[in-house]
Image: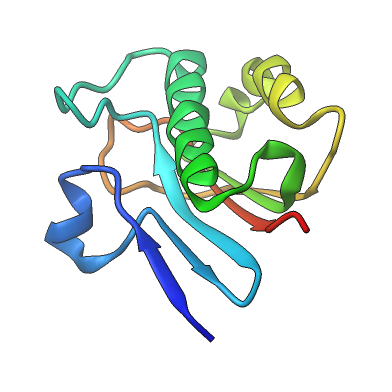
Amino acid sequence: MTIRRITTGSTWEPKIGYARAVVAGGWVHVSGTTGTDHATGSIPESVTDQCALALEIIGAALNRAGAGFADVVRVHYILPDRADFEPCWPLLFAAFGANPPAATMIEAGLIDPRHRIEIEVTALLPG
């Protein structure tokens, strides 16, 4: 089995030692992704802006792996404040609604206190 690692330029990837996504055995495992602009390091203030950016980064990683949001079978949402989850629902429905994955929302602290949401997905490669 071949393993392919996908990186996205996050400053955290080389600092901690992980890949944004790993493709192995027909699966795409996307690491927990926050709404941090990898080019500038900036983090939007609102949870919805962070959610949109995290979904954009995840979408790009899935695309590079040969998959898309329709191929996601499992998603984990991690938020420091569960009250921030509901404002994200329209964005999450837009990404996953036609092909809903199994999902879990966890309330927990994140690596940077400015982060308000982190999203991790697992997808099955089409074909």
Residue shown at the point (76%, 39%) measured from the top left: 70
Question: What x and y, as percent, mark residue 124?
Answer: 71, 60
Residue shown at the point (15%, 59%) measured from the top left: 14
Q: Nearer the viewer, residue 97 or 81?
A: 97
Question: What x and y, as percent, mark residue 3?
Answer: 45, 76
Q: Is residue 85 left or right of residue 59?
A: right
107 is higher (above) or lower (below) than 56: below
- Quadrant (top left, top right, bottom left, bottom right) of the N terminus: bottom right
Q: Nearer the viewer, residue 67 or 117?
A: 67
26 is higher (above) or lower (below) than 119: below
Count the marks. 0
- As drawn, the residue found furthest toward the bottom would be 1
Residue shown at the point (33%, 60%) measured from the top left: 19
- As drawn, the residue found furthest toward the front would be 127
Q: Is residue 127 left or right of residue 67?
A: right
Residue shown at the point (76%, 23%) measured from the top left: 93
- Quadrant (top left, top right, bottom left, bottom right) of the C terminus: bottom right
Color theme of the render: rainbow
47 is higher (above) or lower (below) than 116: above
Question: What x and y, as percent, mark residue 66?
Answer: 58, 49
Q: Nearer the viewer, residue 16 or 57?
A: 57
21 is higher (above) or lower (below) than 107: below
